[in-house]
Image (spheres, rainbow, N blue to C red):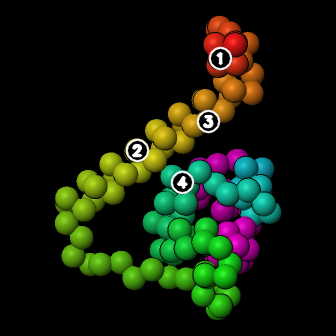
């Protein structure tokens, strides 16, 4: 489970929730939710993978397909990463960030249709 793996990583590194939140550039309360129940946006999963050298994507798999060993798993990165690989990685992070922002915006419009300068999606459908 993602939250258990995230907490195991933090305790393995000897970091507080605040220190971990700082390294991920988020509020402590946001980080705390990820450690207890919620999954972070995709760009944060990618950031965790890169920042700490772990396969955070595997933490999102259902438990029956996850490897049985506890604790964070280390990813062995290639040493011969090319500039094209780095640019592709930067592009993917930007795309994930944009997709997350769009998703958050649409979710906000759906929840509060009258707040964003118009009738919103619900009034449009009627």
- The residue wearing badge 4 is 42
Instruction: Write the residue at 51% across / 52% down.
Output: 43
Q: Residue furthest toward the bottom?
A: 69
User: Residue tagged by mark 1?
Assistant: 125
- In the figure, is residue 80 to the left or right of 53? left
**As displayed, is residue 120 above or below residue 19?**
above
Residue at disc 1, secondary structure = helix
Q: Secondary structure at mark 3?
A: helix
Q: Quadrant of the N terminus?
A: bottom right
In whole angstroms, how far apart are the C-alphas of marks 3 and 1? Answer: 20 Å
Q: Earlier in the sequence, mark 1 or mark 2?
A: 2
Residue 88 appears at what percent x and percent y?
Answer: 28, 55
Q: Which stretch appears magenta? A: 1-28
Outermost residue to the front:
126
Counting from the top left corner in percent of width and height, residue 10 is at 68, 72
Judging from the image, what secondary structure is the residue with disc 2 in? Answer: helix
- Residue underneath mark 2: 95
The quarter of the displayed image where residue 31 is located? bottom right
Residue 93, image x and y in percent? Answer: 41, 51
Mark seen at residue 1: none
Is 5 within the magenta?
yes
Q: Which residue is mark 3?
A: 104
């Amino acid at each position: 489970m993602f939250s258990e793996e995230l907490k195991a990583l933090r305790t393995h590194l000897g970091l507080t929730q605040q220190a971990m939140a700082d390294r991920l550039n988020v509020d402590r309360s946001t980080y705390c939710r990820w450690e207890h129940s919620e999954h972070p946006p995709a760009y944060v999963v990618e950031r965790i993978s890169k920042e700490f050298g772990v396969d955070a994507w595997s933490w999102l798999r259902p438990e029956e397909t996850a490897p049985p060993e506890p604790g964070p798993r280390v990813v062995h990165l290639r040493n011969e990463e090319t500039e094209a690989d780095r640019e592709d990685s930067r592009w993917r992070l930007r795309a994930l960030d944009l997709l997350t922002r769009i998703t958050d915006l649409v979710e906000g419009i759906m929840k509060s249709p009258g707040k964003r300068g118009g009738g919103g999606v619900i009034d449009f459908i009627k």
